[in-house]
Amino acid sequence: GQNIDQPTEMTATEGAIVQINCTYQTSGFNGLFWYQQHAGEAPTFLSYNVLDGLEEKGRFSSFLSRSKGYSYLLLKELQMKDSASYLCAVRDSNYQLIWGAGTKLIIKP
Amino acid sequence: GAVVSQHPSWVICKSGTSVKIECRSLDFQATTMFWYRQFPKQSLMLMATSNEGSKATYEQGVEKDKFLINHASLTLSTLTVTSAHPEDSSFYICSARGAVETQYFGPGTRLLVL
């Protein structure tokens, strides 16, 4: 079967760095997405990786290793507004999105 | 975990026809459902939010007369693309939210209009 694994919850301190991991087993691979979702709101797009390596976008970076079926989202200089759920999703060979359950990130002062 | 299904997963239609996509929450009651559209290598774009028994709220730039949304029950929402044209070809994803804040997404429907 197809599966996306990410931690259920993480806690970090304001100003620090946190890495959210995502591992996947899917039927084919056509890209990996990270989304941020604040409580009660629709998810917002953060990053897209289709090739191996690191994609940097401001305070957020996303890494992909297709051979390992692994990705991580790195958040630097954490702010209180970064408290949200972070969703990892993989597009499989049928171009269907396989979603992880999300990682709830709690930022403490 | 909660499961949301979408049907069909793929649809190919001729220009000018209408296409209906169903979104179902299989093991929970969805008070709110969301419809998204995604073009290749782009982010999800929220099209509309629908609450059971009331009219959908459309995002700016989304034509409500073209994309008809019905959320008649707590487990079913439908999106009808009326008079579809090739530019409507996209990947449509629904998501559903129940009593808790967690939003569960369907697998998506790929629409190709010829």
Image: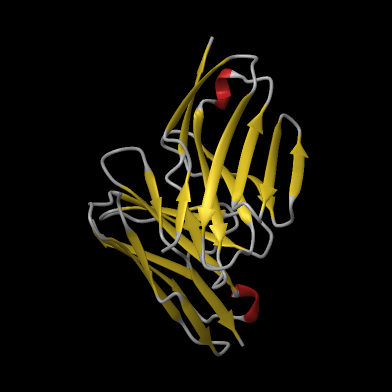
Q: Height in image: B79 above or below A90?
A: below
**What residue is rendered at 59% in x and 61% in y?**
B38
Which residue appears farthest toward the bottom when viewing the image?
B14
Residue A49 visible to an observer of this rendering: yes
Quarter of the image with the N terminus of chain A is: bottom left
**What residue is rendered at 63% in x and 20% in y?**
A78
Identify the image's colour scheme: rainbow, by chain, secondary structure or one colour.
secondary structure
Residue B66 visible to an observer of this rendering: no
Q: Could you tell whether B42 is left or right of A7 in the image?
A: right
Q: Where is residue A79 in the image (x, y as percent from the top left)?
A: 61, 19
Quarter of the image with the C terminus of chain A is: top right
Q: Position of residue B86 (x, y in %)?
A: 64, 80
Which residue appears farthest toward the front when viewing the image?
A68
Query: Which one is nearer the viewer's eye here, B31 or A15?
Result: A15
Q: Position of residue B66 (x, y in %)?
A: 50, 71
**Quadrant position of residue A28:** bottom right
Q: Height in image: A27 above or below A103?
A: below
Query: Which one is nearer the viewer's eye here, A4 or B68?
Result: A4
Which residue appears farthest toward the top when viewing the image?
A109
**What residue is rendered at 65% in x and 75% in y?**
B87
Q: Could you tell whether B29 is left or right of A29 in the image?
A: left
Q: Where is residue A7 in the image (x, y as percent from the top left)?
A: 46, 36
**What residue is rendered at 53% in x and 73% in y?**
B110
Q: Could you tell whether A89 is left or right of B80 in the image?
A: right
The mark total stands at 0
